[in-house]
Amino acid sequence: MTKSIKKDLNKVNKLLHPRSRKAQKLHQKANRLITREKSKKFHAMKENLIGEKLQWFKDRLIPNVRRYTGQMCLDIISTYLSRFDQELEQITIVHTIGKNRKNRRFASREDVINMTILHEKEEFETCGLEIPDLMNMQQLAYLRSWNGELRFLQNFHLTRYTRKQLEEKNDTLLPEDYLPQDDKEEEDVAMEEDESHGNDSREDEQNEDSEWSDVPDESDEDKDPSKPNTTKRNKMAHAFKKHKRCKGKMMVE
């Protein structure tokens, strides 16, 4: 029971007739809240599934490409459709070990995987499998820079690709479709130079500090322990005079 319904029930001071207006209003409100919670859960589940799909494609992107061709999309979709093969093999191995068991182990998981694969393969052959638009440069750049947060799913545009559609595409990658590769050797050399320069500067600072520490302090040498501290004596005298003035003013008043 939600908090709003509890508040409404607390306001009621007497028993309600089941067919009264107030009872009907409470019933309608409860049904409305239940349907709202169901829609929230369904929306969150759908977002999680889309996020997992996008993360799977992001982890298997070709690094130095601005966009995908039809053949590249066909290859990655075939890999996507066979993503459960290893898990199914493990389940079959478990079944072979326990042949004498009456109950089939991991039966629900195996059925869900088989139904999912069958549905996705049917979609890919007929109406199209929904995946991120890898042929679009902007969408592919979004996918590369995506940090996995579900609140950014609205920036992605999912498209449906069929096997026939991708096989008929005879496009190839042009030189401008490749990302510029950074020269790693030059970067490493520059980083080594910066580190060596920083180490040299630190050593120079340490040498300067050691040189200055060897020089004796003139103020310490000038101090004679036999002589009294005149500054401390002057401060005490000044404080005594100030106290005497304040005391005299109070006596006059």
Image (cartoon, rainbow, N blue to C red):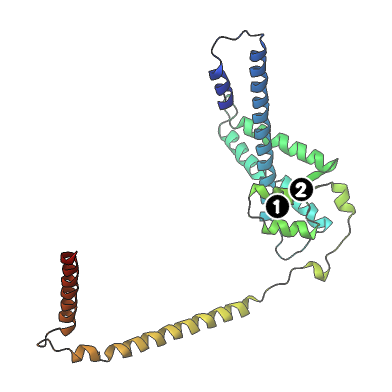
> For the residue carrying disc 1, how many other residues have a C-alpha within 10 Å: few (<14), some (14-19), or many (20+)?
some
How far apart in space, not on screen, are marks 2 and 1 (Cα)?
8 Å
Q: Which residue is mark 2?
A: 131
Q: Which residue is mark 1?
A: 57
Residue pictured at 62% horizontal, 37% vertical: 92
Toward the viewer: 102 or 14? 14
For badge 2, the amino acid type reads Ile
Q: Looking at the rendering, in which quadrant would you find the N terminus?
A: top right
> For the residue carrying disc 2, how many other residues have a C-alpha within 10 Å: few (<14), some (14-19), or many (20+)?
some
Q: Looking at the rendering, in which quadrant would you find the C terminus?
A: bottom left
CB within 8 Å, label 2 to label 1: yes
Toward the viewer: 239 or 211? 239
Spot occupied by residue 161 in the image (x, y as percentages of width and height) = 83, 48
Question: Is tag 2's residue or tag 1's residue first in the polypeptide sequence?
Answer: 1
**How many marks overall?**
2
Q: Secondary structure at mark 2?
A: strand
**Which residue sits furthest left?**
226
Name the side, left or right, on which 249 lies relative to 209: left
For badge 1, the amino acid type reads Phe
Tell me the quarter of the picture where residue 27 sits. Answer: top right
Q: Secondary structure at mark 1?
A: helix
